Image (cartoon, grey):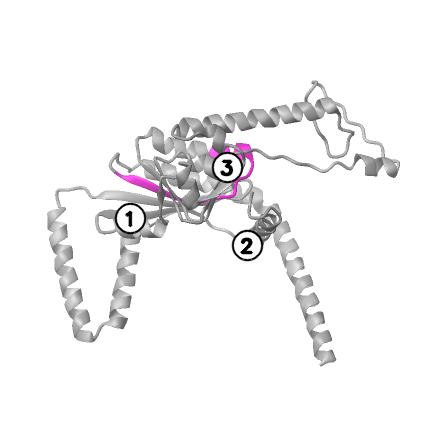
Amino acid sequence: MEFLLEYGLFLAKSITVVAAFVVIVSAIAVASQRTKKEGSEGHIEVETLNHRYEDWEDLLKFEILDEDSFKKERKLKKKQIKAESKKNADQHRKRIYVLDFDGDVSASEVEFLRHEISAILTVARPEDEILLRLESPGGMVHSYGLASSQLQRIRAHGIPLTIAIDRVAASGGYMMACIGNRIMAAPFAVIGSIGVVAQLPNFNRLLKKHDVDIELHTAGAHKRTLTMVGENTEEGRKKFIEELEDTHILFKEFVSENRPQLDIDSIATGEVWYGSRAMDVKLVDEIRTSDDYLLSQRADCDLFSVSYRQKRSLPERLGFAAESAINRTLTGLLAKLSQNRF
């Protein structure tokens, strides 16, 4: 028994070391190919979601119905489709274009989002709709500012924009969400966090203790406010906080402009609300999942999933998978440390 325990511990350590090695090698491979990736061409992929739902429906009916009943269902469905085709021959059915945005700290998917939106705007009509399934805990101000600007292009073209939040849209994520004409959220989706945070360690005392001198020269009184290695001053701290507050003011103004029904001073405290509570304070308009909404629209609308794809090499795929795993792990740890608050 003791031998098995020792062997199990040895095996676990070995797996950990191998996994760490794979992550490091993959990360290096991704870093070395980022320039090449950014310059490479991708392509737009379109999937008709109506067909997907129809395939699922047929599969389930095939399994749960007897052969005669299934054949009757198929014949009846063909007649219905034919009748609807004739009825709608001279009518334009509403189209719903479905986009997905899974945001990380740097909102890196904005590079794909901009292409997807450009493609849709070439064909979208005012009676159509764009549904963005959004997931993001927030991140860097300038990155999410660009992502929000991409969504504003949709509004500027007069195309209705619906935002669906199934899990989380906080901070920069809500900055994007507030642009929607309508915001839907699942009952326990995390919404809000309209605030700004910045932190950095300072190693100045540690370096002094080991007789390491740091020289920092700037041209401009506020070129550098706080540093990680130099000695920070009260003047620098004051300026840093001033800039942080100004960013928060800009954030509040942006949200207020896009959702004037909000009492911005009461909700722009950095707090988060779960879906049902978020509706009470008007952060969202409806409690509903994106799946339920799309399923309810398939009879009357043509549903198209639009995505921009870029061909990646094996090292890149491994590297991005490792990055995604690390991001999710860190997000989970931060959520636990902050009692599920961002």
Question: Does label 1 or label 2 sit earlier along the sequence?
Answer: 1
Residue 68: x and y, percent?
16, 74
Residue found at x 26% / y 62%? 57
Observer-side mark, 3 or 1, equals: 3
Question: Does label 3 or label 2 sit earlier along the sequence?
Answer: 3
Is 234 located above or below residue 301 in the figure? above
How far apart marks 3 and 2 lie (CA) works out to 23 Å
Secondary structure of residue under mark 2: helix
How far apart marks 3 and 1 lie (CA) works out to 28 Å
How far apart marks 1 and 2 lie (CA) works out to 29 Å
Residue 250: x and y, percent?
51, 26
Q: Which mark is residue 104?
A: none
Residue 315: x and y, percent?
57, 54
Q: Which residue is mark 1?
A: 303
How many neighbours does mark 3 have within 10 angstroms: few (below 14), some (14-19), or many (20 or more)?
Answer: many
300 sits to left or right of 331: left
Is 330 located above or below residue 6 in the figure? above
Q: Which mark is residue 321?
A: 2
How many neighbours does mark 2 have within 10 angstroms: few (below 14), some (14-19), or many (20 or more)?
Answer: some
Asked if residue 234 shows in the view, the reply is yes
Magenta region:
128-147
Report the front residue among 220 and 65: 65
Q: Amino acid at mark 2?
A: Ala
Q: Which residue is mark 3?
A: 172
Residue found at x 38% / y 38%? 117
Residue found at x 85% / y 35%? 208
Asked if residue 115 shows in the view, the reply is no
Secondary structure of residue under mark 1: strand
Secondary structure of residue under mark 3: helix
